[in-house]
C-alpha cells in the first residue's frame, strides 16, 4: 500500500518536540481543514529558516548574518559575557532580564561520560575570547543540573586563569530543572542577584 | 526593526492547534538545533499536501484522487453509510472500529443560529446519495453536542424519507472510565437509558 500525502504529513509533524501520533493527526487535519494559508506560510518559513539560519561567528547563537545583531550592536556592554548551553537559554534570558552584555552559546555542556570534553565543546573559541582582554565578567548561566554545574565549575576556573571575574545567576532556580522552562519572574530575579564565584 | 527568519518561523508555528508562543519557540529552536532534515521533510510534506490534497467527490473526506481509496474500494460494504462531521471523526472511527461500510463527511453541522442550514451544509449531495437506492443503513455519527444532536435528528428523518434505516452509535459511560469523572450530561444520559440486566 502506498503512503498518502496525508499520512506523510502526519508522520512529518512527529519531528516536532512533544508531538506524538495523535497530536500530529490533529495538526495535519487542522491545517488542511482550516489553515491552508497558515500552513503554506509555515512551510515557507521552515524551508527558509533551515536554509538561511546558521550560527554567529562570535557567540554561536542562531544568526542569518555572519555576526548576529546582538554581537554587532554598539549598545551592548562588551565587558560582560554570559555563557549559556543553548540558543533557547539565551532567548529566555534576553526576554526575561534587562541584561545588556554579550552572550556565548556553548551548544552543549561538558559530559565526560559521553566523551564531551573541553575540546569537543569547542571551548578554545571561548578561551580565545577571554584572551582578547575585553571581557571583565563571565556570567556562567549553564543549567542547574549535574553536568551544567560541572561545566560552570570548569568555566569559572577558565575565567580566573584569564583574569576574568566569574559569576553565576543566584540560586532560586529549581535544581534539576531546565533553564529554558523556568518562569520569567524566577529567572529574572536569579539573574539579577547573581553572585561572584568566590 | 526587521523581523528575523527565526521570529517569522516562531510566529508561523502558532498556526498549529494548541501551540502558543512558548511552544512555538521550542519547536523552532528544536528544528534548527537538532532536526533540520526532519524540518525540511515537514516543510515539503506541508506544501505538497496543501497543494494536492482536496476532497473526495463521493464522501467529501480528504483525498488526493477525485474518488478516495475507501469509496473506490471493492471490499467495503456499500449498503452502510456512516455520516460524520469532520475528516478527523472519520479517521477516529476507521482506526477504532472494524466498520467496513462507506462514509460521508458533512464538513460541519447544522447550526441555524450561525445561518448554517441543510443548503449551506450541502445536504443535497447526501440526499442524492440516499436516492441512489444502494444505502440501506445510515449510521449517524455526529458529535453528542446540541448541534450534533439536532443534525442527527434531521438526518434520521431524511433517511426515513428515502426508505433508509437510520442508526446512532450508543451513548453512555466510556469503557474503563471512572464513573466519578464522567461528565454530568453523559452520566445522566447513561443512567436514564439503563437496561435491565438479563
Ligand atoms: Zn552573536
Ligand atoms: Zn471518498
Image: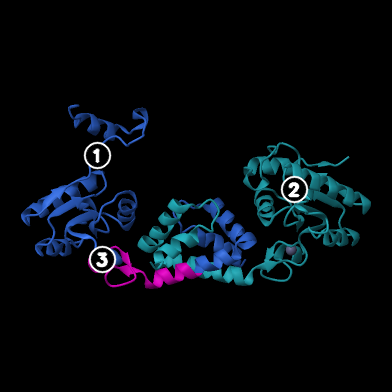
Chain colours: A cyan, B blue
Tell me, yes or no, whether the two marked residues, 3 and 1, touch with CB atoms within 8 Å.
no
Q: CA distance from mark 3 to mark 1?
A: 30 Å
In the shown orientation, is residue B94 left or right of residue B192?
Answer: right
Q: Secondary structure at mark 2?
A: loop
Residue A118, x across and y down, in percent = 83, 55
In space, the residues marked 1 and 2 are separated at their CA atoms by 53 Å
Can you tell which mark lies on residue B73? 3
| Region rendered in magenta | B44-68
Q: Does residue A72 show up magenta in the picture?
A: no
**Is label 3 on the same chain as label 2?**
no
- Chain label for disc 2: A
Asked whether residue A133 appears in the rendered view, the answer is no
Nearest to viewer (mark 3 / mark 2):
3
- Read off the residue under disc 1: B171
Quadrant of the frame with the N terminus of chain B: bottom right
Q: Which residue is mark 2?
A: A142
Query: What residue is at 72 percent from the left and 52 percent from the top?
Result: A85
Amino acid at each position: 500500500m502506498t503512503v498518502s500525502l496525508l499520512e506523510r504529513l502526519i508522520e512529518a509533524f512527529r519531528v516536532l518536540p512533544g508531538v506524538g501520533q495523535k497530536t500530529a493527526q490533529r495538526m495535519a487535519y487542522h491545517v488542511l481543514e482550516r489553515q491552508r494559508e497558515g500552513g503554506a506560510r509555515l512551510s515557507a518559513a521552515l524551508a527558509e529558516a533551515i536554509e538561511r539560519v546558521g550560527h554567529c561567528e562570535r557567540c554561536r547563537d542562531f544568526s542569518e548574518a555572519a555576526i548576529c545583531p546582538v554581537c554587532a550592536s554598539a549598545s551592548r556592554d562588551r565587558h560582560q559575557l554570559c555563557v549559556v548551553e543553548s540558543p533557547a537559554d539565551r532567548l529566555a534570558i534576553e526576554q526575561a532580564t534587562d541584561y545588556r552584555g554579550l552572550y556565548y552559546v556553548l551548544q552543549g555542556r561538558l559530559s565526560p561520560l559521553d566523551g564531551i570534553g573541553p575540546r569537543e565543546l569547542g571551548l578554545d573559541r571561548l578561551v580565545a575570547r577571554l584572551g582578547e582582554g575585553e571581557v571583565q565578567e563571565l556570567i556562567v548561566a549553564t543549567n542547574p543540573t549535574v553536568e551544567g554545574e560541572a561545566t560552570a565549575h570548569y568555566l569559572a576556573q577558565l575565567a580566573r586563569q584569564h583574569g576574568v571575574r566569574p559569576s553565576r545567576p543566584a540560586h532560586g532556580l529549581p535544581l534539576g530543572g531546565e533553564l529554558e522552562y523556568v518562569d520569567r519572574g524566577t529567572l529574572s530575579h536569579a539573574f539579577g542577584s547573581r553572585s561572584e564565584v568566590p
